[in-house]
Amino acid sequence: MEASRRLAQGMNRRTVIAIVFAVAAIAIACGALAVHSGLLAADNTTVLHVGTRTVRPPMLAPVEGTRARNVILIVGDGMGFTQLSAGRIALRGPDGILWIQTLPSSAIVRTQSASSLVTDSAAAATAMATGVRVPNTVVSVDANGKPLRTLFEKARARGLAAGIVTTTDLTDATPAAFVAHVKSRRDRIEIADQQSASGIEVMLGGGPEHFLPVARGGRRVRTDLVESMRAAGYTIALEPAALATPKSGKLLGLFEDTKRPPLSTMTRVALETLARDPEGFVLLVENEETDSASHRHELPRLIRGMQELDEAVRIALEFAKADGRTLVVVTADHETGGMQLVETKVAGTLGVRWINGKHTAQPVPLFAWGPGASSFAGEIDNTAIHRLLVEALGLEAEPPEGRP
Ligand SMILES: [Zn+2]
């Protein structure tokens, strides 16, 4: 009895110890799992695969002179420093660089609007287009609703041609701010009205519904802006296959989201069309994917967006190198998502974390090359982009507003 009780107690002690060890082991395993899955899911962290092939296009040499004939402004919507780094590391390897990073002049850009330290695309684009800080959602009008003169309007008054190219709707905030003046970015029909009436030489992007009447699948009650623009001398492309450089005249390309041409193709066609103007041109090129992907924390889509943006930069640089009088500026309107790159335990990867799904107050990068590029330096306000582009084009001697 005594012996068997001792045996049972011993068994119990051993069982208890075993159970304690088992529970501890399970707890440790669960903890590790929690950390692991937390890294991959709960914290919204995804894995960025580091590019294995180093690609380094040669840096461009700074250009003498400050007077440009043409300006190409390229905007990666939502592209902060981290989006840029993520694109570079994934596409070009840890020691590689994108075409964007071959532009030798650079600046850091503050992005706050008149209503918030966290801007939206409308206020940021208005700052770049007009040099004036406005509240979020406002498109190139002052507090009284009076139009603010845009870079495009100043350039066209001097005989330069103008164009907008975007992967999103033409009536979206960024392309709208350079051409239209409305109190709210949501007024898409009014924006389309003003864009079609602006007479700018090239418009390539999405959102045909804002230009077409209900009868043709659009959202307009009656007016058909596509037909009125055709009558005004625009060549119209409503399918990617129909997009080509017109022999003469202006160009309107409106594409459904699901079947739009690559940004680089639209950029090339826009440049070929605008380059005919002997006075020069201003061109806005925008990639929206970088913003949309960052809002939704879609890493592969972000990397594809960065690749598409960089390919458009390559096309712009090809043109600028051959032309010799073109200022190319690549920047963003704001950062989106509070993106972070963090260490992982797996070689060849980085963890990607996001703070939220909104825009942030972080400054954004700017790169420039061509005549006037060296003026972009240090930390600048986004409103300075307008002033520096106006100066580079020699438009600063415009008569003050209101005077004939
Ligand atoms: Zn956004």
Image (cartoon, grey):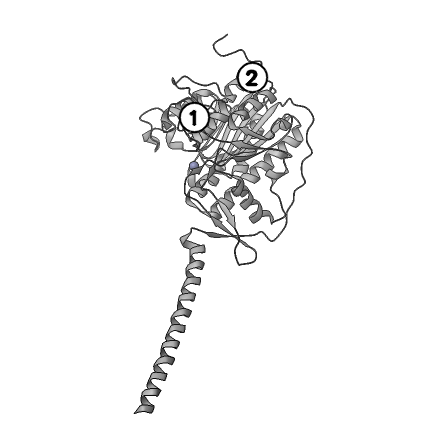
Q: What is the x, y in percent for residue 377?
A: 61, 30
- Foreground disc of the pair 2, 1: 1
Identify the residue shown where x is 36% and y is 84%. 10
Q: What is the x, y in percent for residue 227?
A: 41, 25
Q: Secondary structure under badge 2? A: loop
Please name the residue that numbered disc 1 is placed on. Answer: 114
Report how many numbered discs are placed on residues in the image. Answer: 2
Identify the residue shown where x is 45% and y is 55%. 39
Q: Secondary structure under badge 1? A: loop
Quarter of the render that holds ligand 1: top left
- Could you tell me the amino acid type at mark 2? Gly
Please name the residue that numbered disc 2 is placed on. Answer: 159
- Could you tell me the amino acid type at mark 1? Ala
Is residue 245 visible in the rendered image? The answer is no
Q: What is the x, y in percent for residue 48?
A: 51, 51
Label 2–label 1 contact, CB within 8 A: no
Quadrant (top left, top right, bottom left, bottom right) of the N terminus: bottom left
